[in-house]
Image (cartoon, helix red, strand yellow):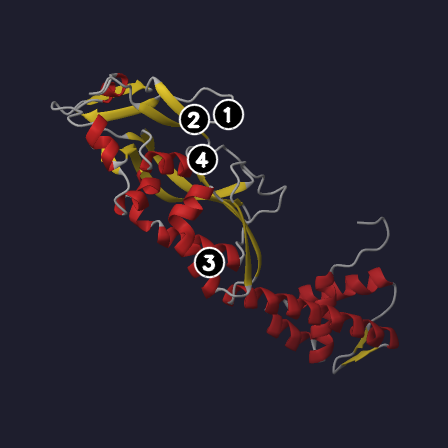
Amino acid sequence: MTDGPWLDPTDLLLFARVAECGSFTLAATQLGWPKSTLSRRLSALEERLGERLMRRTTRRLTLTDFGAAVLEHAREVVAQTDATLALAEHRRAEPSGLLRVSMPADLAVGVLAPALAGFARAHPRVSLELDLSSRRVDLVAENYDLAVRGGVLADDATLGARRLASFEGGLYAAPAWAADHARGWTHPRQLLEPGVEGDLPHGLLLGMPGRAAKPWALSRQDAEGGQEVWSGLPARTTQANLPALLLEMAAAGLGVTATAELLARPLVEAGRLVRLLPGWQLPPESLWAVFPGRRLMPAKTRALLECLAEALAPCRPA
C-alpha cells in the first residue's frame, strides 16, 4: 500500500449499485445493508476522491460529471468481480488447470495407476503432473497441490492432511524360495539360521545409500493374549531405497523382504509372492494425503483427493 489516497474496491461496488438503482433505499434493500451505512460509505468515498459523485435531493439522485466518469470505472470493478466469481464457480463445477502431485513411485505404479488413469479420463481439463522421486517436496515453496506420504507426519501449520489408508506389513518371498528355505518356519529368528543346504537366508532391505538399514520389527499375539516382539535382520542382505525393486527381486527368488501388504498385494495376487509367517506383522503404518492448508481447496485437488481415497478405501480400518 502507498502513502497516498487508497480506495476500497467495495466502495466502488456500492457506488455502482446506488447509481444503477437511483436510490439509496432500493440499493440498501438489494444489498442487505443499512441505508445509513451505505450513505456513510459513499460520503467517505467522495471525501477521499475530493469531489461530489452525486447530487441528492429528497426525490432523486443525479450523478455529477465526475460521478459519471467514476461510474465507468466502478462498472469495470463490478465486471471483474463478477468474472472472478464466475471463474470460481466454474472451477468448482469442473476441475481444471495444472495439478502438481508428489507420491512414491512404487505406490503410483503398483497400486494407484488404474485410479490415476481413471482420474485423467474423468477430468480432461486437468493437466496432471506427477513427481515420483523419493525426495520430500516442499509443497508450498515448490507450488505442489498434493503429496502422498507414509508414516508419521511432521507438525507443520502450513499444511493440511487426510489419512487415506492404514495397513499392516509382513515378510514376503517367492513361492519357490519359501518352499526351499522357509518350510516349517514358526518364528522370525529362523531368518538367522542356515537353511537345509547350509546357506543363510538373504534379506532384501529398504534403506537409503550410506545409511544402516533399520532392523525388521515384527510382532504377534501369543497364546495368553500378550504380544511377542522380535527385531533383527538376516545376516546376508541387499539394500535399496525403492520398495518396488525389492519386491521384484524377492519375486525373482533372491530372498525375503519386509514390506507393506498394500505394496505386496499385486504380486501376491499374481502368484509371484507369498506371505511368510503370516501371524507376524510389521508395525501398522498410515498413508496420508498432504496439501497446502488453504481455507478453500481447489476443485482439481479435491477431485483427486476423493479419487485416491476411493481407490484406497479397502485399506482403511472399519
**Going by the image, does 127 lie left or right of 176?**
right
Q: What numbered label is drawn on residue 242?
A: 4
Residue type of the residue flagged with mark 4: Leu
Looking at the rendering, which quadrant does residue 257 occupy? Answer: top left
Q: Residues within 10 Å of mark 4 (few under 14, many from 20)?
A: some
Does residue 210 sit above or below 118 in this rendering?
A: above
Q: Position of residue 193 (x, y in %)?
A: 24, 16
Residue 307 visible from this viewpoint: no
Tell me whether the residue at label 4 lies in contact with that at label 3, contact meaning CB atoms closer than 8 angstroms.
no
Give the residue pinned by disc 3: 303
Q: Residues within 10 Å of mark 3 (few under 14, many from 20)?
A: some
- First along the sequence among labels 1 and 4: 1
- Foreground mark, 3 or 2? 2
Q: Position of residue 50 (x, y in %)?
A: 88, 63
Q: Nearer the viewer, residue 208 or 103?
A: 208
Tell me whether the residue at label 2 lies in contact with that at label 1, contact meaning CB atoms closer than 8 angstroms.
yes
Residue type of the residue flagged with mark 2: Gln
Q: Secondary structure at mark 4?
A: loop
Q: What numbered label is drawn on residue 239?
A: 2
